[in-house]
Amino acid sequence: MPPLLICHRLLLILLLSVAASHGDSSNDAYDSSMCLDQPYTCGGVKISYPFYLAEETKELKGYDNSYCGYPGLGIVCDGGKPTLQLDGPAKYTITSINGTIPTVSLTDPKVLGGGTDTCPRPIVGGNVTLSQGSWLFFPDSTVDYLVFLIDCSFGSGFPRPSNIDPISCQGFGGGPGLSFVLPDDEVPARNWSHACRQVIQLPVNKNIPVDHTDYRWRNSEYGKLLREGFQLGLNDSVKPQACIRCEQSNGKCGYSQGMDFIDCLCPDGRMHSDNCVKGAALSGSWPFPSHEHMSNPVVPPRAATLHLF
């Protein structure tokens, strides 16, 4: 073989090698400690992907504070208490993550009187909602709603309904007017914002019986229902195809603080663009039950005011 041809072939092999090692930016290494390969226990709650520890963020491809998990599922373990921040500044205590839906109850920052108060009430400006496109939603199968009508004044233009009684808890406060707490389907159809200083809807556990006509309910029983917490489900409909393919190949999804999918974080400590098995036909899905597999799915997630206990 002529020497010139040999040189050309060696040069071609060298160029292909360089392209294979440097041309595919998806083969970058990452700090695998950012992924929860084993469940992390905080306050008796086992935390695992797609949740992540909010303190364990790393740099991925130039994006600082990136994480291994889904947007909005960063958990802070503070003093042995796992908390999750939803839309807004409020943080909520996670009481369990049971493999189907995480059960979340509100923590002290959004409560007047603390968790032992027998007459809990929402604070002014305490509304927190799940935004459109959130990775979490309130499942209709497990969540109902209470409505607080706070500091209401009635007159000829807005007479008081005769079929509801006000909260009788001495420590409730809320203002000089009357206040009420009712299941949302028991609230008389009116524009209550004309008569009441605040109208707040709060999610509660649907599986606990409520008798709002019982005097004990408006005295303190409603507080027990609030402290039972409520459940949240994962909204799989917002997951991008790249993340789906990543999980199908035994990878975990890496996201930026801007909630953009960055890369697939693979068990070998490398990043790939969308899956860990090059050229493989992927099927199936990551086994966490999704929004679409739960009874009474909600698409899109329902906006609701989060509860106080």
Image: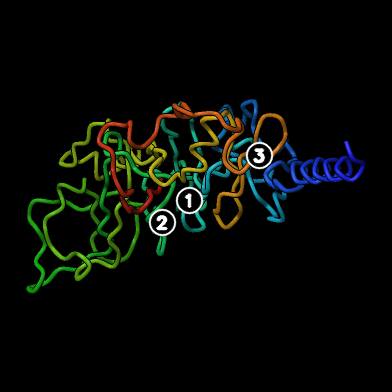
Nearer mark to the viewer, of 3 and 1:
1
Say which quarter of the image contains residue 190: bottom left
Residue ranking furthest to the right? 3
Quarter containing the N terminus: top right
Residue corresponding to mark 3 = 79
Residue corresponding to mark 2 = 128
Q: Nearer the viewer, residue 62 or 241?
A: 241
Residue corresponding to mark 1 = 86
Could you tell me residue 148's position as x and y percent? 27, 54
Please report whichever mark, 3 or 1, sits nearer to the chain's N-terminal start.
Answer: 3
Residue 28 is left or right of residue 69, and the answer is: right
Mark 3 and mark 1 in contact? Answer it, CB < 8 Å.
no
| Real-space CA distance between mark 2 and mark 3, rounded to the nearest whole angstrom | 24 Å
Q: Residue at x 37, y 44 (%)?
A: 137
Residue type of the residue flagged with mark 2: Val
| Real-space CA distance between mark 3 and mark 1, rounded to the nearest whole angstrom | 19 Å
Please report whichever mark, 2 or 3, sits nearer to the chain's N-terminal start.
Answer: 3
Q: In the image, is residue 241 above or below residue 129?
A: above
Residue type of the residue flagged with mark 1: Leu
The number of numbered discs placed on residues in the rendered structure image is 3
Q: Residue at x 39, y 59 (%)?
A: 127
Residue 25 is left or right of residue 102, and the answer is: right
Please report whichever mark, 2 or 1, sits nearer to the chain's N-terminal start.
Answer: 1
Residue type of the residue flagged with mark 3: Gly
Could you tell me residue 94's position as x and y percent? 50, 37
